């Protein structure tokens, strides 16, 4: 049985699955219930400035019958008294000494306010802090949450204030609502943070009702931006995670990262960890299905680790990071073409229409006489010599392993864009580019 | 029927008579319909559409259900097939659209029939009308027979501005949709709503008028620019066995008709019923008899299971309904008691011999194998009489026949220039079905329009696109 336990900058957790700072982590009752069901840690719902909540706090995207592929909320930080939250933190820590209990903090931008709440919270015996610099709604309008995270200088300053008094590890939670997430990440590093977490929710308006013209979520006839989360945001989270985790400065600092944003299954968790997350945090999936999903997350990850021969999480954390690259460093000589397995093809011909209308017109419909049917339907056939290897057809194909992208080598030079423009800067002129293409055996359709 | 057609749990003993005659398959809820619609792959040049005799653009109407454009979905269906609500219920989808769905191998095919019903019912319940009578073009067309072929032709012609009169010998229009489809497959109201839709296009219906009896063909041809014959077929033929004239011996079609036109509790039926034949109407008779409360219903068929003409899903349905089958059995006499009531069916066992003209192995009696099946009612469902009478009346006009059916060309025109025909009365070979009748009506409408107006008219274009 592989060992799922992690050490996150000194915070010990029996497994990498944490509840994110959110409604499922609102109270001792919920967090203890979650721990009993297997969750390794929890980031308590943010405590700090006094707030009032509104009704109709959620908006969702449902897709083709699947509910909540995206969830947005306008709920604020904890609206329960600070004393109650602190008392319950102490209770949970007493009852679950080996689980990770992390306090999420957000107060106004005053040194005294931050330092006071950090000190008060440490007395509960919690394992660490997460600074909420990410909440994009309600709090940001009051100068907190993402309003801080969007200004690297603020991030650095507040982190410094906190680090001056904190004796427990401090995680800085980053907002995705920035143009370059690496800058606030580096600011947190500079401020002395012990770790990073990302992403917080993405600013969003979920929808408009075609009958009432009201926005979703609808607060008494009005609506506005809220924080977007859930499976739909996972690719964005993975990108931001890889950007931060792959940043040379962050890499050098060896700051651990807690990844989140659309984690619903053990598979999602593994992906986040392969891209450098040490722990993963989950909210939307729990809001949809309850705490019980963690049983499969633990088992699924264990089974996968066993299959792959990994004994501990450290064996695979960050394993895909070296593959994170960018366009300028991709191999221009790597070439693939689509191949259709006509034994599997069901002749929906979606590949044909996708290629014809939206790609490079290199799939034909042909008579193949594969079956004994008298009036056989036409089959999609790739004209390989014209296939640019874009991969759209295999993406639209509804049959598993029917269209595969096969690597071929037609003798194109294995060079990258960066190498090419360095060696042949003249290709930045169209006529020279055309000339180069000819020599490099690259045909455009 | 396909596995995903899950009827309501049917426990006859827990249901009232009326409940037993509700539609077998409940309508889709909005959520069910959208979920099912979203399973559709939206194939390019979809095979389901090719399989539909009326070429309904199935992927498009399904996508419209998925996007919440149910009204548009109904329009897409009805543009190709005015009888879309009937076809949604009675089409043998297993052998047509759903049978050709690409999702058959690893998945369930899309429930196209039920989706079509969802969309057409939506439009019907909301009273949405998509079509209106065309600008009058001064041409008069008579349609004989208000079944699916006649209604389809009448509707298409009315859309193109023709003055159409439909003559129907029965009290109600709709033909077999009204009288011949079992009520738990298609309630009468669905068929009558389609008639109403055609009527609202300005088509005149003259019911209780039989051409050749109440009005001569000569007059009809004289008074109209074209005539479309959609007269269907006749009653169930004679079996030519002794005892056939006894009162407990019923015509299967009349039996079905009774359940559609009379109150269910007034229908007299036996407790031990023999149904002769193994076609779809025979199955209908047997299953109706069960649902009416007959204790034992046995279907008697002279060939074997493999040759039975009923659709396989109908056969399975009958088995589920508790109908028993006696294959390779031929009735030779209907027996009666002292009071002249049916009390048994004398049969003889058969063996399959050499293939006959139809390619099926022909049944041969086994000598000395007679036996009696006790019963108190016999229902005959061994096909329908060919339109012999009408053919005789039309022969003087030069209307030709083929194998006892009306002979038509590709455009559904008979050998007489003004007379067109379609539906079961021209189906001299192969199976007949509602959807084919609807297409016959469309083809004839296009031919009539082309003949009377010239090729460039919209209707001709619309139909020739198919």
Image: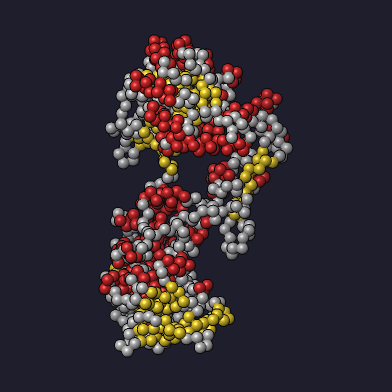
Q: Position of residue B452 (x, y in %)?
A: 40, 68
Q: Which residue is pictured at 38% across the width and 59% down the height?
A: B9
Q: Nearer the viewer, residue B138 or B368?
A: B368
Relative vertical location of residue A30 with respect to residue B331 in this rendering, above or below: above
Q: Is residue B383 visible?
A: no
Q: Quadrant of the C terminus of chain A?
A: top right
Q: Nearer the viewer, residue A370 or A252?
A: A252
Q: Which residue is pictured at 30% across the width and 31% down the height?
A: A55
Q: Quadrant of the N terminus of chain A?
A: top right
Q: Nearer the viewer, residue B156 or B235?
A: B235
Q: Which residue is pictured at 48% across the width and 33% down the height?
A: A38
Q: Nearer the viewer, residue B186 or A276?
A: A276
Relative vertical location of residue B133 with respect to residue A196 in this rendering, above or below: below
Q: Is residue B116 shown left or right of residue A347?
A: left
Q: Is residue B350 shown left or right of residue B65?
A: right
Q: Position of residue B13 (x, y in %)?
A: 33, 65
């Amino acid at each position: 049985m592989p060992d799922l336990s992690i050490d996150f900058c000194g915070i010990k957790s029996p497994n990498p699955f944490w509840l994110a700072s959110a409604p499922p982590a609102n109270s001792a009752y919920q967090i203890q219930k979650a721990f009993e069901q297997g969750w390794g840690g929890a980031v308590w719902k943010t405590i700090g400035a006094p707030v009032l909540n509104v009704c109709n706090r959620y908006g969702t995207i449902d897709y083709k019958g699947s509910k909540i592929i995206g969830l947005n909320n306008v709920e604020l930080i904890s609206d329960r008294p600070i004393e109650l939250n602190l008392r319950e933190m102490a209770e949970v820590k007493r009852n679950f000494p080996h689980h990770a209990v992390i306090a999420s903090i957000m107060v106004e931008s005053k040194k005294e306010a931050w330092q006071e709440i950090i000190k008060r919270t440490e007395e509960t015996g919690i394992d660490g802090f997460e600074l909420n610099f990410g909440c994009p709604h309600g709090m940001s309008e009051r100068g907190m949450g993402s309003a801080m995270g969007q200004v690297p200088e603020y991030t650095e300053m507040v982190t410094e204030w906190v680090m001056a008094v904190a004796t427990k590890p401090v995680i800085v939670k980053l907002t995705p609502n920035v143009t370059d997430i690496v800058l606030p990440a580096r600011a947190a590093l500079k401020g002395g943070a012990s770790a990073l977490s990302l992403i917080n929710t993405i600013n969003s308006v979920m929808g408009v009702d075609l009958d009432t013209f009201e926005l979703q979520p609808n607060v008494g006839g009005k609506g506005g931006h809220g924080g977007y989360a859930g499976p739909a945001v996972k690719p964005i989270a993975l990108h931001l995670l890889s950007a931060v985790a792959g940043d040379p400065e962050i890499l050098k600092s060896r700051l651990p990262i807690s990844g989140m944003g659309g984690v619903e299954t053990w598979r999602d968790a593994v992906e986040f960890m392969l891209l450098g997350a040490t722990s993963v945090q989950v909210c939307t999936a729990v809001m949809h299905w309850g705490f019980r999903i963690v049983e499969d997350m633990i088992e699924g990850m264990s089974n996968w680790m066993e299959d792959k021969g990994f004994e501990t999480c450290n064996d695979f954390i960050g394993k895909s990071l070296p593959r994170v690259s960018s366009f300028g460093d991709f191999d221009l000589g790597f070439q693939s073409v689509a191949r259709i397995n006509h034994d599997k093809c069901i002749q929906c011909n979606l590949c044909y229409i996708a290629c014809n209308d939206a790609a490079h017109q290199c799939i034909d419909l042909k008579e193949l006489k594969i079956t004994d049917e008298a009036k056989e339907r036409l089959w999609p056939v790739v004209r390989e010599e014209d296939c640019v290897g874009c991969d759209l057809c295999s993406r639209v194909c509804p049959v598993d392993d029917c269209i595969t992208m096969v690597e071929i080598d037609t003798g194109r030079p294995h060079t990258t864009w960066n190498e090419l423009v360095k060696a042949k800067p003249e290709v930045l002129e169209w006529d020279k580019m055309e000339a180069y293409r000819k020599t490099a055996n690259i045909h455009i359709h | 029927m396909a596995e995903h057609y899950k009827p309501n749990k049917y426990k006859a003993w827990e249901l009232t008579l009326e409940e037993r005659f509700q539609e077998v398959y409940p309508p889709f809820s909005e959520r069910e319909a959208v979920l099912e619609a979203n399973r559709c792959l939206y194939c390019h040049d979809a095979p389901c559409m090719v399989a539909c005799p009326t070429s309904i653009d199935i992927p498009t109407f399904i996508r419209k259900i998925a996007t919440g454009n149910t009204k548009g979905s109904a329009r897409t269906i009805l543009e190709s097939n005015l009888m879309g609500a009937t076809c949604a219920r009675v089409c043998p989808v297993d052998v047509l659209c759903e049978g050709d769905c690409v999702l058959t191998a690893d998945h369930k095919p899309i429930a196209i029939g039920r989706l079509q019903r969802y969309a057409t019912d939506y439009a019907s319940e909301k009273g949405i009308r998509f079509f209106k009578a065309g600008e009058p073009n001064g041409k008069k067309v008579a349609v004989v027979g208000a079944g699916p072929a006649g209604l389809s032709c009448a509707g298409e012609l009315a859309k193109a501005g023709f003055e159409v009169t439909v003559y129907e010998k029965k009290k109600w229009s709709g033909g077999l949709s009204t009288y011949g489809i079992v009520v738990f497959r298609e309630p009468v109201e669905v068929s009558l709503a389609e008639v109403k839709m055609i009527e609202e296009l300005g088509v005149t219906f003259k019911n209780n008028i039989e051409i050749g009896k109440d009005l001569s063909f000569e007059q009809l041809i004289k008074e109209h620019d074209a005539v479309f014959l959609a007269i269907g077929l006749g009653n169930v033929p004679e079996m030519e066995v002794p005892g056939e004239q006894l009162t407990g011996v019923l015509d299967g079609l009349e039996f079905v008709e009774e359940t559609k036109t009379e109150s269910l509790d007034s229908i007299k039926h036996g407790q031990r019923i023999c149904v002769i034949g193994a076609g779809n109407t025979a199955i209908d008779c047997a299953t109706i008899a069960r649902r009416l409360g007959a204790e034992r219903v046995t279907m008697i068929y002279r060939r074997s299971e493999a040759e039975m003409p009923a659709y396989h899903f109908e056969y399975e349905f009958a088995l589920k309904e508790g109908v028993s089958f006696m294959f390779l059995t031929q009735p030779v006499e209907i027996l009666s008691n002292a009071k002249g009531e049916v009390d048994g069916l004398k049969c003889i066992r058969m063996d399959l011999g050499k293939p006959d003209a139809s390619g099926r192995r022909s049944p041969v009696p086994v000598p000395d194998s007679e036996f009696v099946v006790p019963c108190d009612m016999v229902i005959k469902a061994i096909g329908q009489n060919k339109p012999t009478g009408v053919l005789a009346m039309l022969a003087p006009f030069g209307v030709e026949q083929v194998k006892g059916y009306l002979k038509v060309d590709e455009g559904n025109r008979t050998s007489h220039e003004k007379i067109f025909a379609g539906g079961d009365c021209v189906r001299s070979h192969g199976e007949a079905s509602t959807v084919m009748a609807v297409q016959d009506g469309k083809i004839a409408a296009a031919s009539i329009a082309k003949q009377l107006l010239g090729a460039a008219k919209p209707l001709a274009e619309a139909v020739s696109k198919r």
